[in-house]
Structures are given as structure tokens and as C-alpha cells.
Amino acid sequence: MNTTGSPRRIDLSRRPNHHLAFGNGPHTCIGAHLGKLEARAFVEELLRVVPDFRPDGDPELEWNSIDGRRIPGEFLSLPLVVVT
Ligand code: HEM
């Protein structure tokens, strides 16, 4: 499925996978490496406790604005269903 241009849809296998996650242009996020490490630790722990799950509806996001660009802020909800 081509999800380019679908900012509310999470598709970890998306190709091409251009995104603004840690900035785009002359500035970039100084905490990118720590952020990626924290994300990896979160996913590893989640998979240890809940090995199989799938999305259950669209996530609810809070949006921020940087220099007029609209970027995802934080997840307010991320509905998941545990697959048994
Ligand atoms: C998933 C986690 C994170 C995401 C998605 C993220 C995203 C971003 C984005 C989009 C920018 C703006 C870049 C630009 O101006 O184009 C930024 C800047 C920045 N971030 Fe992060 N960030 C994350 C984690 C962190 C962490 C963990 C730290 C510090 C420990 C951090 C520190 C900073 C700082 C200091 C800037 C300003 C850099 C500058 O203006 O030169 N970030 N981040």
C-alpha cells in the first residue's frame, strides 16, 4: 500500500519513507540518536510483554507547528488489539 501523503496512517514498511521526524533542512534534532534508542527500547519491551497485536482504528495525534510546518506532536491514543 502506498501511504505517502497519508500522515495519519502508520505504515512501518512504507517505501519510499521520506518523513520529517527529526527535522528537514538546515536544522536537525540534536536528540535524534537518543530518541531512536528510546523508541527501540519501547518497541523491544512492548514486544516482550505483548508479542502479537495489530492497530484497531486510527491513532489520535496532537499536532505541533514549526516554522509554519505541521508536524506530529504526541500520540493521545493508539488503539491496539492483542492477537491471541
Ligand atoms: C522521537 C523523539 C524526537 C523527535 C521526533 C524529535 C524531533 C525534532 C524536530 C522535528 C526538531 C526540529 C528540527 C528542525 O529545526 O528542523 C527537533 C529539534 C531539537 N530536538 Fe528533537 N526530537 C526528538 C527527541 C529529542 C531528544 C530526546 C532531545 C534531547 C535529549 C531532543 C532535542 C532537540 C533539540 C535541542 C532541538 C533543537 C536543535 C536545533 O535547533 O539546532 N530531541 N527535534
Image: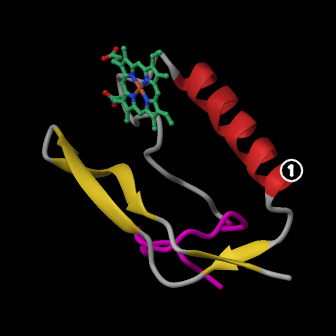
Residue 59, image x, y percentages? 44, 71
Question: Which residue is nearer to you in this view: 30 or 41?
Answer: 41
| Number of marks drawn | 1
Q: Which residue is mark 1?
A: 48
The quadrant of the rendering that contains the N terminus is: bottom right
Residue 31, image x, y percentages? 50, 19
Q: Amino acid at mark 1?
A: Arg
The magenta segment is 1-15
Where does ligand 1 appear, by image quarter?
Answer: top left
Seen at 22% across and 47% down, the residue is 64
| Relative to 64, 39 lies left or right | right
The quadrant of the rendering that contains the C terminus is: bottom right
Q: Is residue 23 above or below residue 13?
A: above
Magenta residue check for 77? no
Residue 7, image x, y percentages? 41, 68
Of all residues, the one furthest to the left in this rendering is 68
Magenta residue check for 4? yes
